[in-house]
Image: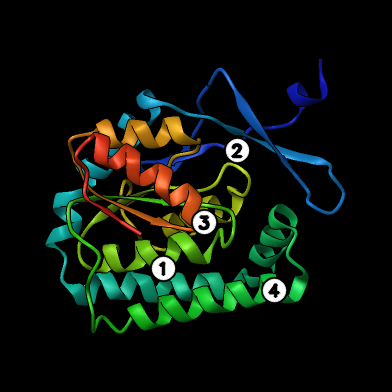
Amino acid sequence: MTENDEILAIPLWINGHAYLTMTPTFFDVRDRCTGQIKRRTPLCGTDQALTAVASAQAALPAWAALTIAARAMLLAALAVALAAYAEHFANLIAEETGKNAASASAEVEQALRVLKAAATGSVATGGSGVVAVVCDDQAPLLGPLRLAVQALLAGATVVVKPSPKAPSAAFALAELTARNGFPGGVVNILHGDLAAIEGLCTASAVGLLLFTGDPALGSKVAAIASRHGKPFVD
């Protein structure tokens, strides 16, 4: 066996549980300080993207039928859970991005503020239907959370595609949603690069594509969305 064969791939998160898939290629996620390979990100394509979107679409009617107050209550529970695991999330961020401990902890604190603000239920924006959220590795927790929270509060279900370089914070957050009352399919995690984004844009159920991160990558994502006629916001 090679070193890569012995390293576990990080699963997708679909319909409220970890979803294992085999892909032709993987991205080696390294500890930015030591260079050690920690895990492998499956570089998914259209098939996995459509599976994630189908999960979000199936969960949509019941989620949208909840009151804003009910959705806000679940976001409040998620904030409490994230606070309890703040150190764990900061460690994941530092490991995969190379941020120092203070910067990683600050990102978790900002994410908590976003959740607590949304938990008031006073503002619900970010689109409806199934929303795809794409981000880079600059802020692997705060970036997707900031976009996904407002969409969730507005009654949308989401498919989050984190950076293959830093996938763990988004996946761990999805695990917390399941432990804290979110119905399966409301939050889904799809791994990959541009091929995964292409797959998301082929799905008719995706009504909006949101992006946060580096403008150069944003331009590539916008071009894919435009080619498929998907509304795009960065």
Tell me the residue at 20%/61% (across/down). 127
Instruction: For marks 3 and 1, give the one nearer the viewer.
Output: 3
Depth check: 77 or 90 in front? 90
Q: Earlier in the sequence, mark 2 or mark 1?
A: 2
Q: Which residue is mark 3?
A: 214
Dot 3 crowding, Cα within 10 Å, few <14, some 14–19, many 20+:
few
Q: Secondary structure at mark 4?
A: helix
On the rendered structure, is 62 left or right of 196?
left
Q: Identify the image quadrant of residue 37.
A: top right
Q: Is residue 127 above or below residue 217?
A: below
Q: Which residue is mark 1?
A: 146
On the rendered structure, is 128 left or right of 217?
left
Q: Position of residue 134 (x, y in %)?
A: 42, 50
Is residue 54 visible to us here?
Answer: no
Q: Earlier in the sequence, mark 2 or mark 4?
A: 2
Instruction: For marks 3 and 2, give the one nearer the viewer.
Output: 3
Which numbered marker is on residue 37?
Answer: none
Identity, as a three-letter code, of the amino acid under mark 4: Ser
Q: In this figure, which colouring scheme has been used for the structure?
A: rainbow
Q: Which residue is mark 4?
A: 103
Which numbered marker is on residue 10?
Answer: 2
Q: Earlier in the sequence, mark 3 or mark 2?
A: 2
On the rendered structure, is 48 left or right of 67?
right
Identity, as a three-letter code, of the amino acid under mark 2: Ile
Q: Secondary structure at mark 1?
A: helix
Tell me the residue at 51%/67% (across/down). 142
- Looking at the figure, which quarter contains the C terminus? bottom left
